Amino acid sequence: MLQPRIYLYSGGMSAWIEMAAFVAILTALTPALGGYMADVFTGRPTWAHRVLGPLEALVYRTCRIDPAREMSWTEYLAAVVAFTAISAAALFLLLVTQAALPLNPQHVSNLTPLLALNVAISFATTTNWQAYSGETALGYLAQMAGLAWQNFVAAGVGLAVAIVAIRGFTRSRGTTIGNLWVDLTRSLLYVLLPLSVMGALLFIWQGTPQNFSPYVTATTLEGAHQTITGGPIASQEIIKQLGVNGGGFVGANSASPNENPTPLTDFVQLLAMFLIGAGLTNTFGRLVGDVRQGWTLYAVMLALFVGGFAAVWGAEHAGNPLVHQLAVAGPNLEGKETRFGDTASALSVTVATDTSSGASNVAYDSLMPISVLVALVNMQIGEVIYGGVGSGLYGMILLAILTVFIAGLMVGRTPEYLGKKIERREIVLVVLAALVPAVTILLPASIALIPGLSATGNGGPRGFAEIFYAFTSASANNGSVLAGLGIQTNFYNWATAIVMLAGRFGTLVVVLALAGGLVRKARNTKTIGTLSTTTPLFGILLAGTALIVTALTFIPADALGPIAEALLLRDGRTF
């Protein structure tokens, strides 16, 4: 069995070099991947078609898919719902029967029906909320045929819907928005599969296990027994990050040396979480006929990402003021991997909550209050800072439509975005999308405050933050959690399952309905009176709109949690 290599990795200058390299490489890869995806989804031949083209044709013949037949937005939505429901049901059956199935060398038992239902919904919505530890609760077949499969198809659905959102602006006076089965097949075959194969091989090279052997029991120098986890980890690890799903093979997730053995794997995992979301901005620009449109969205995402990282790093590097009173100066290293240090850990927290991944190399419950606040805002903003596969782009498009509408009101012009007039129907849909996180976070969090429903590990503002963070994470399909909260209860299994579904489909339905209306509209020619959406001013307006809408909705609740805790911590009070 390949053994993971352990490195000591300080959080000093080398980590700052990693941050700079991360932004540089991501920016360089964005037009390359974006151009490739533009070719894939418009049917233009690529290098991958020479290898995978016959397989695509075979899928169409076997599944009786007519690639020339397109769907209305309601047909597309019905197909998405049906596919998600059937795939989630298959995962549920696998989880409640795994004890009798092969590839279960640890002989783990079946999940309870309620927990299995929660897990099935979680992975079908890319949330990967885990009220269990994978290495002790799941066999290899459930990990591969269940969780890893869902990581692929759920991400593929999100990517397909993002392409539909783009078609809303590229088509004129049409009635159809594409074919889900074609879009999904292309997402899986030409985007997710090749990148996953390359990433898995890299992880195996670096020491991530990929085998079917039982776990190994070792005896330490002190005479204690230690279980070393193995299994098909590398193949699941890459799609976990690339599809920004976040569900770890083991309970420690990316803090585990098996899942994340070296600084290189840590860097690649972080890059994989942003890669497709960033590339889609360039795909968007190419398909609408103006790459500057895509770079504008990319620049806004990058600015929000860098600002969030700076805040998290500043809070963690400054450390706990109570510890400093004892003359022990230094960063907050509680809950962090010393292999990566405080800077790389801050980068991980920011990237994971900017996307729908939630996978991190740090214990979230050990973060300073300001870091918790940034993580919350990253999710409350709709995870449009690169975001989930597909959902990041279409969330940002919704914000761009709202921004041009507000700007149009200020200057007295009929708002347009990419040649399409923004009228009453579009604004109603955008407002409905903005209400989804408000309802799915604030309402269930309020119910959870009823005595007896929540078991928090801390009191005061920190205890409130544990509850509030859980529903923020579930609604944003992120899956991370402040570990002090007891979530293995009937209430949280039911509540988070409902919130995960509403968070995923509440926005997705709006996007498909929006695209269905936009394709019917003529695309107007740009005039001297048209608001430019490629200028730095528009970028500032877009970022400001995102932050203001988020603040108006969530700042009172944020103030009761991490903001109050940060202020009280300076006064010497902990919870």
Image (cartoon, rainbow, N blue to C red):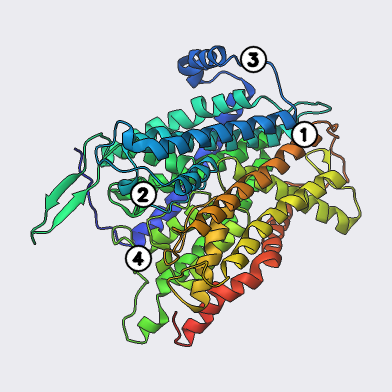
Disc 3: CA contacts within 10 A as few (<14), some (14-19) or many (>=20): few
Is residue 385 visible in the rendered image? The answer is: no
- Residue placed at 8% from the left, 62% from the top? 222
Residue tagged 4: 335
Disc 4: CA contacts within 10 A as few (<14), some (14-19) or many (>=20): some
Image quadrant containing the N terminus = top left
- Of circles 2 and 1, which is in front? 1
Residue tagged 3: 66
Disc 1: CA contacts within 10 A as few (<14), some (14-19) or many (>=20): many
Callout 4: SS: loop
Residue tagged 2: 266
Of callouts 1 and 4, which one flags the residue occurring earlier in the amino acid sequence?
4
Q: CA distance from mark 3 to mark 4?
A: 52 Å
Callout 1: SS: helix
Of callouts 3 and 4, which one flags the residue occurring earlier in the amino acid sequence?
3
Q: Circles 2 and 1: CB distance less than 8 Å?
A: no
Residue 286 horizontal/vertical position (percent) = 66, 33
Callout 2: SS: helix
Q: Name the amino acid, label 4.
A: Gly
